[in-house]
Image (tube, rainbow, N blue to C red):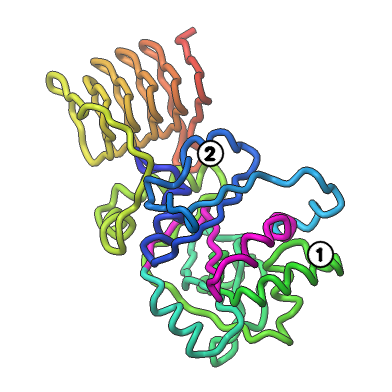
């Protein structure tokens, strides 16, 4: 993401910048890559003796509980929550990208004596980009009535961003009750099923929020950072985004390449033209090549005379000489990891 980061870097950095020192990451299926990147959390200052970063792989030992979705993952790590001294928890979805000072949201959670605070943003959606996202229904005092699905019937709506501040004892209680009763498929579902017995308020976040749910939204989330105000909102205004460091030389710009409005990481070799693009570490763009409105991931090679427009090129791919790849903004052309595209 953004030429030198992983998407998970944003969520972890957001927590660290808000003073959180104990963080559990549920790694998903591709655990090797995640563990290699996050390691012991040193890059985020999370390699302390008693607190820090805790990585949890997917559970496989109990098939009957897996149907409970993220509740099953949380139940498998109850010891993590029960042994921590903190009284409250912040839960973030890494696919929702934002950086925000959450002091005001946390103070509102404490002062309102709520059990749970759901974070949301006000969305004005003319294009249907946010259809099928979570829609928060609030009363006049901003307490939560329900969570529905946005069907695009209203242009303006409150989008729940899968970010929750919750009392730890309430979280543990919800997890145990849901496992025993088997009456919910997710933590969100469990919260709504208990809405009449819990005090659930909401807090509106302002600023840049981007959701990555498919290749198109991933493509847009990256290219949106080429707008200076969006870049500053994510990387400058609310603390820095930290990542695993990689020592490489600066990018070299050889004789007369045309480079405009792009994010280019270190270690690259640029001879061709680059416009409105995201270029990761160690990319080589040869003389006469053109890259426009595209994402080129690390160690990929764009050979002489190739043209890449509206495309996503994964790591270690090669686009050979005189090849033209042209996607669209709604459906970018995708070349997979280690892929080779030949002219014939």
Q: Which residue is mark 2?
A: 35
- Badge 1: how crowded within 10 Å, few (<14), some, or many (20+)? some
Q: Secondary structure at mark 2?
A: helix
Could you say where residue 163 lies in the image, as x and y percent from the top left?
A: 54, 66
Q: Which residue is mark 1?
A: 179
Q: Quadrant of residue 174?
A: bottom right
Residue for point 43% across, 32% down: 311
Residue 176 vertical position relative to residue 112 in the rendered view, above or below: above
Furthest residue to the top? 344
Residue 299 vertical position relative to residue 239 in the rendered view, above or below: above
Q: Nearer the viewer, residue 19 or 82?
A: 82
Residue for point 74% across, 56% down: 72
Could you say where residue 298 lies in the image, as x and y percent from the top left?
A: 38, 28
Disc marking residue 22: none
Residue for point 43% across, 49% down: 47
Which quadrant would the N terminus be assigned to in this image?
top left
In the displayed structure image, the side of residue 120 where residue 285 appears, left or right: left
Q: Quadrant of residue 219?
A: top left
Furthest residue to the left? 255
Residue 274 vertical position relative to residue 7 in the rendered view, above or below: above
Queried whether the magenta region covers residue 80, the answer comes back as yes
Could you say where residue 132 lies in the image, as x and y percent from the top left?
A: 63, 60
Queried whether the magenta region covers residue 86, the answer comes back as yes
């Amino acid at each position: 993401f953004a030429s030198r980061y992983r998407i998970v870097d944003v969520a972890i950095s957001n927590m660290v910048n808000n003073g959180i020192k104990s963080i559990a990451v549920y790694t998903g299926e591709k655990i090797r890559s995640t563990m290699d990147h996050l390691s012991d959390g040193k890059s985020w200052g999370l390699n302390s003796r008693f607190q820090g970063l805790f990585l949890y792989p997917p559970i496989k030992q109990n098939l009957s509980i897996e149907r409970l979705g993220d509740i099953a993952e949380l139940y498998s790590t109850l010891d993590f929550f029960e042994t921590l001294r903190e009284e409250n928890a912040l839960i973030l979805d890494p696919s929702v990208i934002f950086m925000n000072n959450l002091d005001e949201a946390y103070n509102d959670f404490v002062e309102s004596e709520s059990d749970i605070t759901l974070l949301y943003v006000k969305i004005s959606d003319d294009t249907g980009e946010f259809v099928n996202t979570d829609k928060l229904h609030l009363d006049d005092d901003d307490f939560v009535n329900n969570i529905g699905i946005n069907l695009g019937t209203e242009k303006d709506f409150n989008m729940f961003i899968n970010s929750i501040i919750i009392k730890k004892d309430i979280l543990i209680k919800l997890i145990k009750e849901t496992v025993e009763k088997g009456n919910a498929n997710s933590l969100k579902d469990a919260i709504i099923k208990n809405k009449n017995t819990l005090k659930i308020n909401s807090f509106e976040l302002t600023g840049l929020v981007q959701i990555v749910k498919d290749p198109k939204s991933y493509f847009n989330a990256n290219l949106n950072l080429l707008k200076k105000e969006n870049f500053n909102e994510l990387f400058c205004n609310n603390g820095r985004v930290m990542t695993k460091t990689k020592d490489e030389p600066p990018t070299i710009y050889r004789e007369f390449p045309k480079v405009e409005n792009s994010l280019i990481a270190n270690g690259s070799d640029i001879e061709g033209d680059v416009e409105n693009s995201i270029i990761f570490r160690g990319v080589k763009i040869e003389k006469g090549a053109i890259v426009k409105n595209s994402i080129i991931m690390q160690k990929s090679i764009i050979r002489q005379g190739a043209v890449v427009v509206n495309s996503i090129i994964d790591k270690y791919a090669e686009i050979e000489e005189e090849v033209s790849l042209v996607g669209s903004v709604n459906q970018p052309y995708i070349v997979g990891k280690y892929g080779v595209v030949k002219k014939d």
